[in-house]
Image (spheres, helix red, strand yellow):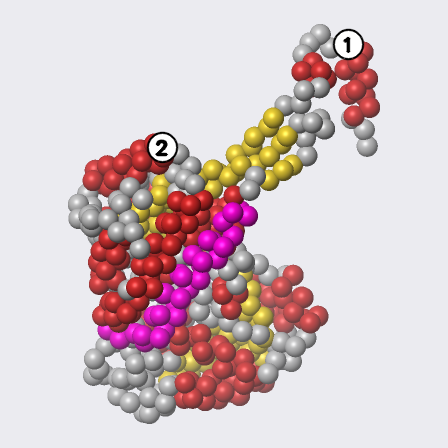
Amino acid sequence: MNTVTPIITTDTSSDAMKALLDRQRASFLREGPPSIETRTDRIDRVIALLVDHKDAIASALSDDFGSRSVEASLLLDVFTCVGSLKYAKAHLAEWLRPEQHEALFPDAVAEVVYQPKGVVGILSPWNFPYQLALAPLAGILAAGNRAMIKPSEVTPASAALMAELIAGAFDETEISVVQGGPATGTAFTSLAFDHLIFTGGTAVAHHVMRAAAENLTPLTLELGGKSPVIVGRSADLADAARRVMTVKTLNAGQICLAPDHVYVPEESVEAFAGHAVAAVGAMYPALKENPDYTSIVNARHHARIQGLIDDARAKGARIVEINPAAENFSQQSAHRMPPTLILDPTEDMRVQQEEIFGPVLPVLPYRDIADVIDRINAKPRPLALYYFSRDQQEEARVLDNTTSGGVTVNDCMSHVTAEGLPFGGVGHSGMGAYHGKFGFLAFSHPRAVYHQSKMVEAEYMMRPPYGEAMRGFLAAAICK
């Protein structure tokens, strides 16, 4: 692994960050589009950083969350990043080839050449501090760009370690990390990046987009929303409940792609709830000090999620707390929260209006699939939709008549594991997509390059005076 003398950016004032951006852009302009070898070397250095320091990364994540499964951290924050980077490396030469297109004259050459944009800003969240800060580097570095990363202040140990590791592996003009709180984040979004990717909540995205508009900075927004699950009548109910609860309890539901609520045939609600309780008990015989069960990241978020449950209870919902060992959670070493089902929810409950981002699952009964489709379409478009069924006609009906960032059929979240598929939202759940070639394209400028024909007609075609030849050409060419 190539190493440099670590220079960790500590001055995060607006002027200091602008100066850092200027240094990166000046270095980018001096170097020009980097070679495949340089791009590959940079990707390899990120991979080595993750592999060599995976244990320290998992430890920092556990410190930040109070308790987080080592295996979950290695899977979701390290393995996923390494996979994205290796995929980009394997396909880099293919992606960089100019695309040939039809030209007006047979000996003209029309092609698209993909240029790096320059310096990309990454504003990343706290729920997967490494995955959502470093996985975008697969497309960013493959495209030949530099990057500045602003990780979340909610996970300070992870942010500090990331700054140290990046500074040890990269010159600050290649990749740098700036740490700080909300004020730093606000100043970061106001910088004149050549592209900015923000992963986080929809409410903050409005401010990010406004700040980027001042510089006409192109954006990729990876947001969230309330991703619905539909359990069709032909589905294996136990299998559906198990798969839903597996992802709903992963990282304690603190995932932008987590199932937010589930539509179940009205005659199957009680059975689904029973299967969900059994599934959680099989995965987590006890919860309170279980190293496999992640804590809510801090007291503020714990109180917010508990407030959703309390509001639903006060408004008449049935609350099913899944607590297999009947443990008392009032005193614990972290902020763990038992998975909770909310039965008989109504639209006036906060849990139906806000993104949950925790291990709480409203279960909504339905009679007809058309009603479910209407209810989904009446709300902002979600980041994901999950559909369980063995009825292919109904599946086609659901997929054709709803819109979401992505879809997984007969599972939850699996579509994001296919690196070749685009990952992104639509409407309130995001703008733009990355992963695989879609990341390379998002962080590249598709430059049109045209080599003119040597034919005489190519030179004289548009030059006056226009005579009978031109009029004859136009008459023949403009036709049905």
User: Which is in the foreground here, disc 1 or disc 2?
Assistant: 2
Q: Which element is circle 1 on?
A: loop
Please give the residue where the numbered disc 1 appears in the rendered image.
Answer: 467
Residue 104 location (% of width, % of height): 70, 28
Q: Which residues are magenta?
A: 66-95
Camera sees residue 380:
no
Report if residue 468 lies within the magenta region: no
Amino acid type, callout 2: Leu
Q: Is residue 61 left or right of residue 112?
A: left
- Whether label 1 touches label 2, CB < 8 Å: no
135, 154: nearer the viewer: 135
The answer to whether 36 appears left or right of 467 in the picture is: left
Q: Amino acid at mark 1?
A: Gly
Going from the N terminus, do you reach mark 1 or mark 2 first? 2
Between marks 1 and 2, how big is the CA–CA gap?
Answer: 47 Å
Taking the spot 67% from the left edge, 20% from the top edge, the residue there is 454
Give the quarter of the figure containing the N terminus: bottom left
Query: Looking at the figure, which quarter contains the C terminus?
Result: top right
- In the picture as drawn, the residue positioned furthest to the top comes out as 465
Where 283 sits versus 181, above or below?
Answer: below
Q: Residue furthest left?
A: 11
> Considering depth in this image, is 1 or 429 the residue closer to the camera?
1
Q: Secondary structure at mark 2?
A: helix
* 157 to 295, vertically: above or below: above
Residue sitting at 43 percent across and 88 percent down?
282
User: Is 453 above or below relative to 54?
Assistant: above
**Percent position of residue 43, x then y:** 39, 52
Q: Which residue is mark 2?
A: 29
Q: Is residue 80 magenta?
A: yes
| Residue neighbourhood size for the residue with mark 2, other residues' Cα within 10 Å, grouped as few (<14), some (14–19), many (≥20) | few
Q: Is residue 38 visible?
A: yes
Residue at x-position 28% and y-position 64%: 53
